[in-house]
Image (cartoon, grey):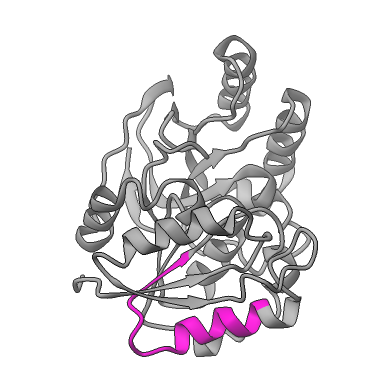
Amino acid sequence: MKKIKTIGLVAPSGNIKNIDEINKKISILENSFKVKKFYNEKAHQNYLSDSDENRIKFFEQAFLDKEVDLIISVRGGYGAIRIVDKINYSLIKNKIYLGSSDATILLMALNKKTNVKCFHSLMISNGFVENLKENIEIIENNSFKLNLKTLKKGKAKGILWGGNLSSLVSTFSQESYLPNKDIILFLEDLNEPIYKIDKMLFEIYRFEKLRKKIKGIIFGDFYLEENEIFPLLKNYCELFNVPAFHCQDITHKINNITIPFGKEIEI
């Protein structure tokens, strides 16, 4: 993969809070890269960064800019589900896109509908700049390491696919973003009580077209104590009956590891 020289920043989801803090991080980023902003930081609409129309426009403009190599979401939050079906994917090609949280929805869509290389990773708001060197090396070399704890033994092969649990489940009204290949499903979430995690995991289980593609599962961080979350995860290991693992580094926290979304792996 070519060296990254220009980074485009997008805000397709939530309102950008702490603008001064974000701009300080962008200034650090500018020490190593040319940075272009594809959003209006003053145009927020309540919990959204901008109107649906403007968020779509800026998102497409970032991909159309010939100078931009890598596109990063500034933050997650909420909003991608409102625009994902309206983006003109025929305009989007030959770029790298990086995001997590609410951007899970965009990772799913870009992976299915374009040739964009996607990474589930920290964003500007939650640690990408603080871990800049490590993240850029993973992206440019397309290499990474997962520290896995075995929950259900076995071997599995498939593409890495998943992300934020609640964001992923919100797409189930349509099947257009489901992958064509077998998958290693990875999941994480925050601020969700145990019963809602249970509910959403069961929604995945009962979604037969998706369940049949799942050849292995990697459970990330759910911001709950191990004695609360692990019994539930082990229950779903048996229910799905596939090799399953735990990775604390798939999370909303600053230790969130950058992993290539859609890359075929064996575990």
**From the image, which quarter does the N terminus lie in?**
bottom left
7 in relation to 54, above or below: above
Residue 229, how many percent across, how many down?
61, 19
Residue 44 within the segment the image draws in magenta? no
Q: Residue furthest top?
A: 227
Observer able to see residue 259: yes
| Camera-nearest residue between 30 and 168 | 30
64 in relation to 82, above or below: below
Q: Residue at x 54, y 48 (%)?
A: 163
Residue 61 within the segment the image draws in magenta? yes
| Camera-nearest residue between 201 and 143 | 143
Q: Residue at x 26, y 65 (%)?
A: 31
Residue 180, how many percent across, how many down?
51, 64
Observer able to see residue 152: no
Q: Which residues are magenta?
A: 55-72
Residue 157, how many percent across, how many down?
36, 45
The total of numbered circles placed on residues is 0
**From the image, which quarter does the C terminus lie in?**
top left
Residue 108, how many percent across, how many down?
55, 62
Q: Residue furthest front?
A: 20
Q: Residue at x 67, y 65 (%)?
A: 80
| Camera-nearest residue between 154 and 189 | 189
Classify residue 148 by image quadrant.
top left
In the image, taking residue 142 as reference, residue 28 lies left or right, namely right
